[in-house]
Image: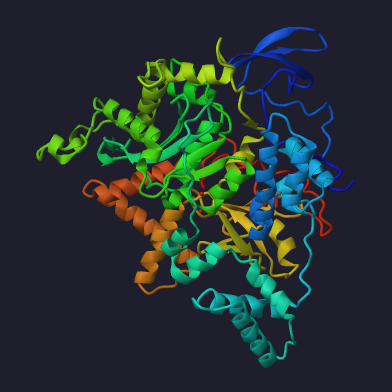
Amino acid sequence: MSDIAMLPVQLTFRFEPGVEVDLGGHAGVVVSVLSLDSVLVEDPTTGERRVRPVAGLRPWSGPAPRERRPIPDLAEFTEPQLEVGRRRQDEIDALLAMRRRSKQDVRLAAERLGLAASTLYALIGRYEAEGSLTCLIPHAYRKRRRRKRIAPEKDQVIATVIEEVYLTIPGARPVDVITEVERRLRRANLGAVAPNTIRERVRELDPKDVDRARYGGMAAERRHHQTYGTHDPARWPLQRVQIDHTVADFFVVSPEDGDAVTRPIVTLAIDEYSRVVKGFYLSIHRPSTLSVAMALTHGILEKEEFCHRHGLESPYPVWGIDDGILTDNAAEFDSRGLQLGCRQWRIRGEFRPLGAPYFGGRIERLIGTMMADVRLIPGYTFNSVAERGKDYDGRVSAALTLEEAEQRLAVMIVDRYHRDKHSALGTTPLKAYEHGILGSDRVPGRGFPRMPTDPGRLLKDFLPVDYRTVQSYGIRLNHLTYQSDLLRVFASRKDGRKYVVRQDPRNVSLVYFYDPETQEYYDVPQRDRHRPPVALWEVNQAVAELKQLGQDADDENAIYRAIERCRQIDAEAARKSAAARRRQERRREDAKAHTPAAPAPAADEISAPAEAGGPPVRRVRPVADLEGWS
């Protein structure tokens, strides 16, 4: 059976009457939605109806689930391919939003896309069934891409010239690349390459990446950055969620000795319509794509375990995939991983216009409210030097660890803020959210939002992405080497292809390698399995120290010896140095990612796929945590 004929993986689902759900081996049918966290489900075999919590319910896939076509990662595709998919997605979204869609509407949209109307109807059906951008990209489900017809030696010459000429010299043109490639090929007696082949390689480059290489990141942002206005207020829950960071106005202490460490960073996500806090993330790391992704996914996933862990009295039935997110223009909101993740999960990404902070007024006010409520937390720092006074030091009275501070914020948000009457709404944020979802006597609700069928896939799609070739020794990433039996299959092909690799910066003991044939991710550990788990920032710190000493920064043994030296120095200096205490606490926070509750098997524990592309015998569990917008 071909890939196209197979049923697609259902990326998302929605709780609504008539939807079949899994009742533990047999199907049940949702009869009605009762509340934000419960639905009435009927068992067709017995006719029994029971109220079931939303948490844990998953769509029914049949008594003997058929093999389904996996969804390729968007990082596999070139920018021109992604642009075709985006144009199709925008046109189809506009058609699906129409109350009465006519054949003329579809015909005009097909003409704009350069497609036949019948083809567009087929794409609409596929998009509604699968719900991902991938299904709109031409030839996305072909197992093998068309192989390059030129020799690897010629291909390497083209790549080198593009890197040294086109991406380095600001005024370089494609014709200059063609001339230089032809000159080098003649000198190496490798034979000629068609000029159009070279032009196609240049055309595949992302214009933003070209300008970043030529002129720097700031110039590339100014030239390619696009902002969107948000003058219209949100009309339903999750239409637009604002995300931002702030430095908390209190210090946290080390759980070992109780000494003050630093002021943590809070990343908050607020729903514009109801003002509920969709999700948040507390960390002592500086704002990053990891912070954004953790807050984003915390908001999307169910929070039953979160409430239990923090001992919250009130429910937190706020979950689901957002329609759009609004952020400022900071670098952490503009990474490739976050961009691709938002496109794949149909989350519209919007930036505030430069110099217009009032576009993010909801999140700014929430930050002010949260920081005003932490005044009673031990270690409070006040808002300014004038308010604090010269003699006051918040470090002296600090008493909460990072985990305790997270619990304190959770109580403030869920048990207080969500239940207090909001002056602008005239009701509580949670009640406004409930009315917007379920409806009221006067206004119909929007219904339950979409949920990810596979939470692991959601988290994985937002991880930072890199591209690496597979060599006989494995993969080199961030000065470390990763190897497994799975990689040996790809190394033996010697095709020079770059494969998609993702990594959680909190734990670089393994990477996640994307197999384009099975369209699955597999865990690939470091070549030396006896290495202790470390974070990426520790590796970077060790590499910088080795370079300063004039030593080999690619020597893994030297890197880990430098990491151990830094840890010993920080441990000895922790009582005297605030910076050392911060580094120690960062290690403790990163250690949460080192020891997952149920570790996934490594890729070398899996039978390697045959050259023909058969699936491995044993699947790898999806990533349990994430990081990741450009």
**Identity of the residue drawn at 56% across and 35% down:** 597
Which one is nearer the viewer's eye here, 366 or 586? Answer: 366
Q: Position of residue 107 (x, y in %)?
A: 78, 44
Q: Is residue 561 above or below residue 571?
A: below
Relative to 388, 60 lies left or right:
right
What colour scheme governs how the chains and residues are painted in the rendered image of this protein? Answer: rainbow
**Identity of the residue drawn at 47% across and 27% down:** 273
Q: Is residue 435 visible?
A: yes
Residue furthest front as drawn: 104
Residue furthest left as drawn: 391
Q: Is residue 156 above or below residue 243?
A: below
Q: Is residue 133 visible?
A: no
Q: Position of residue 264 (x, y in %)?
A: 33, 39
Q: Position of residue 234 (x, y in %)?
A: 49, 30
Q: Is residue 531 above or below residue 63?
A: below
In the picture, residue 108 is in which quadrant? top right
Relative to 594, 545 lies left or right:
left
Q: Is residue 368 above or below residue 244?
A: above
Which one is nearer the viewer's eye here, 261 or 36? Answer: 36
**Identity of the residue drawn at 79% across and 73% down:** 149
**Identity of the residue drawn at 61% across and 15% down:** 38
Relative to 355, 177 lies left or right:
right
Count numbered badges in the picture.
Answer: 0
Q: Position of residue 393 (x, y in %)?
A: 16, 38
